[in-house]
């Protein structure tokens, strides 16, 4: 039998950061992961360059049943703190767009940094560790049964096993099941930051244009006071739509509900057709659309959306349609393609300052396993770092 002060389940972004904080405080800290190496999702993130934070990170950039929950942790460890750590390790980085910071070289730099910090903080990192069960002894100590290893006793447990996306990278439902066993509620999970699929009819209309992209403003049609709107690229794929605008809005999308796309943000596309003596016919419409869309997309849109006549009211209706085009996706590409899981351990049963369970003392949940999901653009890592730091300072 072995014992430790803090056992962290999951050596991903949140778990490694929590380990660094807890180890620095002199707590004997063990991190267990069933994968053969730590930080596998960090390695594939940001196209191999890890979008490790976002300069504009605010609580409003996160989805959760309790929109206030993330505030405390996000204030405790900010993007500036993360940048300071990255700079201490002489990792060069750049801002790509919209405050998104990426490594210049490779995501490996971030994993190496976290592993070095763990070593300096005397953290024991155990990969290939199969956790069979976690039980609470009558003394309040946790007992972890491990495959091919003696039991591990721990004063505190931090659950950092992540979400359900990309099962082939080692994602499991372990954290959710453990939470439920200890009496925690789970906000129903669904794939987020995920490409959306078309109905067969829309696929026939659009999917031969796969590879074309255009800037849109994407919103949902839900009746909500705080309706998010994302002005980014939308990409047509061979099964539906993707690109940053789609991924962002997918996290807010409810199946069966149409999405609304402004295909020409800030532009009055049909003004040229209203000029004196201007032509008003399909060719003129296609020409106007070509100023904002790729030509093939403009031509297709023209074919499908021709008005019955070319009067001013019809042009006004057409302009309106360009700015609020409704499309109802058939579904999502699922967890195999999703970057994150929306939903998770209900935040009402967690302390926002420490991430400790309100039901079971010394049990913590951090990172993606919790019902806190960030937008695309470095927000999910910032949540992983920040929630990890908060729990690591308390456990
Ligand atoms: P994470 O998934 O990182 O770690 C969980 C760990 O637990 C894993 O190491 C896993 O092996 C382990 N584990 C799971 N079950 C276990 C079990 N039963 N026993 C033992 N160990 C177990 N975000 C961002 O901000 N910027 C970006 O650039 C990207 N890019 C990106 C690309 C792709 C392709 C994906 C899929 C995701 C992203 N993300 C992202 C999202 C980001 O990767 C994600 O939100 C964080 O990694 C979440 O950190 P966690 O530590 O909570 O989970």
Image: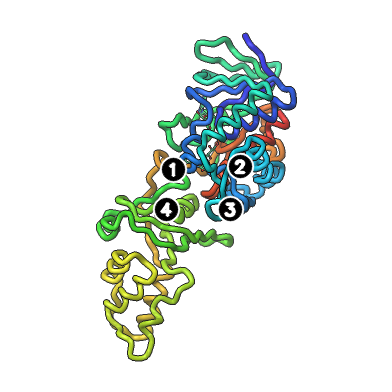
Q: Is mark 1 within 8 Å of ligand 1?
A: yes
Give the label on residue 190, or none: none
- State the SS at label 2: helix
Q: Is mark 2 within 8 Å of ligand 1?
A: yes
According to the picture, the residue beneath numbered tag 1 turns out to be: 338
Q: Quadrant of residue 121?
A: top right
What residue is rendered at 72% in x and 32% in y? 393
Say which residue label 4 marks: 243
Q: Of label 4 and label 3, which has the lower sequence position?
A: 3
Figure check: 268 above or below 87 = below
What is the crowding at mark 3: few (fewer than 14 residues within 10 Å), some, or many (at least 20)? some
Q: Which residue is mark 3?
A: 99
Instruction: Give left or right: position of 229 versus 204.
Output: right
Foreground disc of the pair 3, 2? 3
**C-alpha distance separating marks 4 and 1:** 12 Å
Tell me if label 1 and label 2 are in contact, CB under 8 Å: no
């Amino acid at each position: 039998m072995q014992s430790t002060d803090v056992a962290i389940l999951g050596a991903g972004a949140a778990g490694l950061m929590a380990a660094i904080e807890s180890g620095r405080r002199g707590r004997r800290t063990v991190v267990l992961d069933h994968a053969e190496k730590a930080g596998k999702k960090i390695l594939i993130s940001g196209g191999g360059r890890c979008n490790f934070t976002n300069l504009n990170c605010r609580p409003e950039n996160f989805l959760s049943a309790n929109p206030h929950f993330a505030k405390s942790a996000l204030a405790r460890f900010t993007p500036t703190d993360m940048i300071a750590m990255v700079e201490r390790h002489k990792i060069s980085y750049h801002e790509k767009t919209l405050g998104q910071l990426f490594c210049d070289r490779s995501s490996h730099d971030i994993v190496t940094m976290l592993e070095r910090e763990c070593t300096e903080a005397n953290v024991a990192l155990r990969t290939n560790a199969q956790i069979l069960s976690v039980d609470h002894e009558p003394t309040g100590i946790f007992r972890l049964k491990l495959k091919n290893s003696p039991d591990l006793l721990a004063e505190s447990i931090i659950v950092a096993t992540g979400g359900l996306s990309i099962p082939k990278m080692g994602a499991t439902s372990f954290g959710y099941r453990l939470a439920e066993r200890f009496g925690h509620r789970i906000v129903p999970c669904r794939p987020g930051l995920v490409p959306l699929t078309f109905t067969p009819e829309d696929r026939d209309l659009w999917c031969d244009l796969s590879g074309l992209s255009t800037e849109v403003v994407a919103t949902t049609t839900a009746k909500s006071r705080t309706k998010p709107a994302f002005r980014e690229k939308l990409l047509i794929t061979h099964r539906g739509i993707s690109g940053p605008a789609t991924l962002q809005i997918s996290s807010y999308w409810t199946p069966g509900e149409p999405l609304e796309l402004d295909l020409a943000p800030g532009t009055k596309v049909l003004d040229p057709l209203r000029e004196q003596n201007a032509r008003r016919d399909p060719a003129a419409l296609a020409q106007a659309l070509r100023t904002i869309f790729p030509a093939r997309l403009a031509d297709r849109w023209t074919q499908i959306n021709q008005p019955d006549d070319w009067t001013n009211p019809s042009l006004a209706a057409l302009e309106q349609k360009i700015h609020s085009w409704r499309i109802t996706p058939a579904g999502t590409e699922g967890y195999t393609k999703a970057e994150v899981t929306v939903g998770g351990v209900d935040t009402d049963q967690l302390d926002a300052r420490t991430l400790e369970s309100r039901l079971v003392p010394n049990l913590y949940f951090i990172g993606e396993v919790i019902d806190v999901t960030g937008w695309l653009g470095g927000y999910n890592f910032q949540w992983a770092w920040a929630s990890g730091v908060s729990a690591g300072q308390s456990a």
